[in-house]
Image (tube, rainbow, N blue to C red):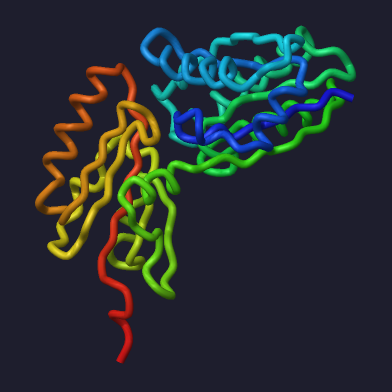
């Protein structure tokens, strides 16, 4: 039976790879490398650099494939993502049919960790649900952007005894600062942090974490919000893409003790 490895590779630093991930990449027959166009070619290059560094097996083949752009016009966010996943599902099925034997193995290299705001697992399950190919899969965890962010800022993720919410920019206003003291925000193309008016909120922001281009800014939100917006725009224009994440916090350890 075919076997698919979904391998978390961290946030761009080749040293983020675990021994488990390296071992998995060296025992597969094929590694699939996604391409998202010229503007994001650097993302494919990072994956290829990781493979050149760690994959020693001469039997491993590398197959590039194009990832379609997500169409957003005249549809809701959920519908646009569902349609996009359907397109990628068809691509994955063809990859398995064309480049794997019935007892072969292959790997996908997933940015960060496959469980956190990545859809490789659910798309592969959609391929399985089609019922035309038999395969099994394994998930290899990776260092998340949340871990990379807190490490770069040298801060703990949580306040003592308090919860943490991980959310998106689209949903941030629902919970911070009213419901949670700590919110980690991903996928914020709308710069939701810049719309929060709270003099006690602090932000820890980072982009290209773990890479040579890493940028971090921290401080009271009211003081650094404009600088983050400008820095983010400049970095995106320079690289043609951006991956960023931030932590918003209000309050401190033990501030709810009598």
Q: In this image, 116 relative to 124: left or right? A: left
Q: Is residue 40 visible?
A: yes
Which is more toward the observer, 14 or 34?
14
On screen, residue 103 above or below 111: above
On screen, residue 80 above or below 204: above
Which is more toward the observer, 192 or 235?
235
Total marks in image: 0
- Residue at point 35%, 62% (across, down): 182
Q: In the figure, residue 176 lies in which quadrant? A: bottom left
Q: Position of residue 206 (x, y in %)?
A: 30, 40
**In the rendered image, which quarter contains the N terminus?**
top right
Q: Position of residue 52 (x, y in %)?
A: 57, 15
On screen, residue 20 above or below 248: above
- Residue at point 16%, 61% (across, down): 198
- Residue at point 86%, 25% (across, down): 134
Residue furthest bottom in the image: 258
Q: Is residue 94 visible?
A: no
Q: In the figure, residue 225 lies in which quadrant? A: top left
Which is more toward the observer, 21 or 100?
21
Q: In this image, 68 relative to 102: left or right? A: left
Which is more toward the observer, 71 or 150?
150
- Residue at point 21%, 49% (across, down): 218
Q: In this image, 172 relative to 87: left or right? A: left
**In the rendered image, which quarter contains the C terminus?**
bottom left
Q: Position of residue 91 (x, y in %)?
A: 65, 15
Q: Where is residue 151 in the image (x, y as percent from the top left)?
A: 38, 49
């Amino acid at each position: 039976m075919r076997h698919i490895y979904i391998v978390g590779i961290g946030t761009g630093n080749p040293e983020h790879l675990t021994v488990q991930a390296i071992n998995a990449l060296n025992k597969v027959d094929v590694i699939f490398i996604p391409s998202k166009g010229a503007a994001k070619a650097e993302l494919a290059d990072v994956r290829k650099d990781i493979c050149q560094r760690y994959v020693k097996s001469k039997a491993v083949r590398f197959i590039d494939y194009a990832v379609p752009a997500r169409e957003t016009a005249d549809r809701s966010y959920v519908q646009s993502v569902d349609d996009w996943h359907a397109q990628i599902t068809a691509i994955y099925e063809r990859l398995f049919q064309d480049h794997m034997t019935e007892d072969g193995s292959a790997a996908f290299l997933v940015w960060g960790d496959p469980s956190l705001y990545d859809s490789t697992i659910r798309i592969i399950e959609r391929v399985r649900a089609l019922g035309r190919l038999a395969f099994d899969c394994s998930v290899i965890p990776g260092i998340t952007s949340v871990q990379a962010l807190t490490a770069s800022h040298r801060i703990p993720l949580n306040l003592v005894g308090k919860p943490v919410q991980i959310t998106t920019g689209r949903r941030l206003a629902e919970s911070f600062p009213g419901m949670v003291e700590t919110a980690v925000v991903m996928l914020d193309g709308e710069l939701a942090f810049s719309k929060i008016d709270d003099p006690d909120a602090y932000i820890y922001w980072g982009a290209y974490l773990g890479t040579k281009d890493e940028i971090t800014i921290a401080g009271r939100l009211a003081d650094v919000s404009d600088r983050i917006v400008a820095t983010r725009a400049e970095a995106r224009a320079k690289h043609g893409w951006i991956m960023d994440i931030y932590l918003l916090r209000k309050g401190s350890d033990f501030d709810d003790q009598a």
